[in-house]
Amino acid sequence: MVNLNNVYNYYSTQILQPRNNQKSNSSHKKDDLKSVYQNMVKQNKDSPLYKFTFSDHIQAYAIGIKEAAMALEAESDSLSGGDNNSLSEMKAVSSNEKVAYARLRDDASEELPEDLTLQVNSLAKGQTNVGYYLPSGELSINPGSYSFGIAVNDNEYTFHMNIHDNDTNIEIQRNLASAINDNDIGIRATVRSNRMDGTSALVLRSEDVGKPENGDVIFRFDESYLENDISSVLGVQQIETAPSNAEFYINDTLHTSVSNRISLNHSMDIDLLSTNDEPIHIGYVPDEDKLSDKITDFLNSYNALVDLAKNEDQHGANRLYRDITNVANRHADELKAAGLNIDDNGHLIKTDEDELFSSTRIQTLFNDKISDFKKDLEKATGKMTLNPLDYVDKVVVTYPNTTGTYPNPYNPSKYSGLLFNDYR
């Protein structure tokens, strides 16, 4: 008889995945465990008592069948067109990605926005100040100690510097720009040079865009509280571009935003990239990349089960190979229509690695209600999951008493289900 302790010890150390690595589609409802138990009892009534040569290798093989069958069933279910699988995970697309780029969030809710039209009148802009153009190779400031004060939104920053006789205007501008950038205050500073007349100016740009809630500017200068502030000497109070909000129409309704990224229903993000005269369309298409990944996972699970059967030297393994490959062989035409072929080794492969699969054909192939392939595959994997020891070589010891309605007293269901750890 089976030593269940050995099975559990092997299973817990070799097979069980950490729970945080297990796929969400391995979770089941509580009723599923009850259904498994009822199926085990039903099978138990008509099951003979067997004698096994149950080595560690055979135990690992039997557990491997169960795990591979459950994995295949899970991947098949993920392609069946349910509410929480890749076929229902659409991607947002824009008819003109030079104007706007749309994408769904990873945590998008089920209530996605409806298709919409978008027309962008103006983008949100930040604030840009350009100082005086001073002679680059000269010194327009008397040597001494100076300060430079700037307020960014509600935060005030002060920079100190010493100016020497041999300093030049462009060196002072570059040193100050470097200090501002190194302190990461929300302002990007550069020096703009005019090579025609040999002058240069300090340029300050806000990292934020859009009009602030309080006031009309993102950053400002106030020399009243600092001694020897050189803001006015550099002329950086001059605003070249004032901050402004984005203005756009969604389905003929005017909206404004302090950012060029807008969010709809906490599900879709749209990046506004440029203005346009004619409305563009934003809608949904199936995410072919995710669908292709799901197909790859399904093929890997199917082929792993085929390899498990081919690499085991037992008569039961031959039966396992027939049970799994017969499903594909019976539905070869439907598989081919969906872009899948059967190779000489019994594996399922993609017709063309570079071909994008038709989501409609894949959905038809795995549809629970209309697909005979899906039903046959579910029946085959259910059998393997419920009683993987059916594929192990064994000897019948006694046949059951079929005249009664009670379960077999030898109770082979102790091992027919093995360890259904994934029911949680």
Image (spheres, rainbow, N blue to C red):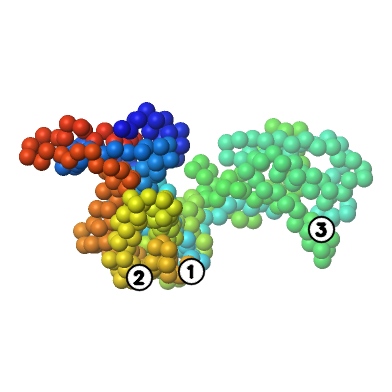
**Sequence-wise, which precedes: disc 2 or disc 1?**
2
Closer to viewer: mark 3 or mark 1: 1
| Residue 240 shown left or right of residue 104 in the figure | right
Asked if residue 181 shows in the view, the reply is yes
Q: Residue at x 35, y 30 (%)?
A: 3
Which residue type carries mark 2?
Lys
Closer to viewer: mark 2 or mark 1: 2
Callout 2: 10 Å neighbours few (<14), some, many (20+)? some
Camera-side residue of 153 and 36: 36
- Residue 269's place in the image compared with 252, above or below, is above
> What's the distance in space between the residues labelled 2 and 3, CA to CA?
71 Å
In the picture as drawn, the residue positioned furthest to the left comes out as: 403
**Sequence-wise, which precedes: disc 2 or disc 3?**
3
| Residue indicated by mark 1 | 354
Closer to viewer: mark 2 or mark 3: 2
| Residue indicated by mark 3 | 199
Q: Residue at x 58, y 45 (%)?
A: 218
> What's the distance in space between the residues labelled 2 and 1, CA to CA?
16 Å
Which mark identifies residue 336? 2
